[in-house]
Amino acid sequence: EVGFDHRFEFFSKDISPVWEDNEYTEFYKYMNKLYHENPALNCAGKGGSFEVLAADSASFSFRRVLGDNVVTVTLDMAEPWNYEIKAE
């Protein structure tokens, strides 16, 4: 649904997206690069441990650790939305 301004209806056919750069392109490029460069983010039992650092109605913070690879994510859940990701 990237690049659309609405959710898809379950049983109706939506047109295929136009695969052009949009406001989300750089974010998803960054997320893909982060995933591929940090083994702690792997899934299916191959990734790192998961630890919740803080959670409340306004923020959520967690850490994934695999050996020397540590990824810490902090999300602000209230406006203005913000995130910070540190990979070590």
Image (cartoon, rainbow, N blue to C red):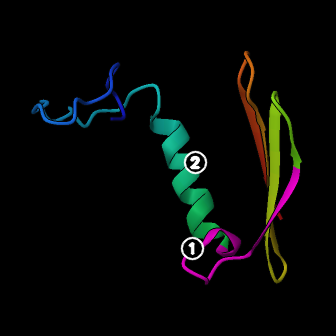
**Coordinates of residue 34 in the picture (x, y in percent):** 62, 58
Numbered disc total: 2
Instruction: Work out which residue is located at the far right of the displayed protein and give it.
Output: 53
Q: Nearer the viewer, residue 87 or 61?
A: 61
Residue at numbered disc 2:
30
* Left or right of residue 26, residue 37 in this image: right
Look at the image and tell me in which quarter the N terminus lies.
top left
Amino acid type at mark 1:
Cys
Residue 79 percent coordinates (x, y): 73, 16
Residue at image coords 82%, 83%? 67
Image position of 77 (left or right of 27) = right
Please provide the residue range marked out in magenta: 39-53
Which residue, as the protein is rendered here, is positioned at the far top? 79
N-terminal-most mark, 1 or 2: 2
Q: Residue at x 21, y 36 (%)?
A: 10
For residue 43, which quarter of the picture? bottom right
SS assignment at label 1: loop
User: In the image, what residue occupies the spot 50% across and 47% down?
Assistant: 29
Nearest the viewer among 57 and 64 is: 57
Magenta span includes 48:
yes
Judge whether residue 83 is colored magenta. Answer: no
The answer to whether residue 8 is visible is yes
Which of the numbered marks, if any, corresponds to residue 43? 1
Badge 1 crowding class, 10 Å Cα cut-off, few under 14, some 14 to 19, many 20 or more, is few
Can residue 71 be spotted in the picture? Answer: no
Q: Are marks 1 and 2 in contact (CB under 8 Å)?
A: no
Q: Is residue 20 left or right of residue 61?
A: left
Numbered mark located on residue 58 in the image: none
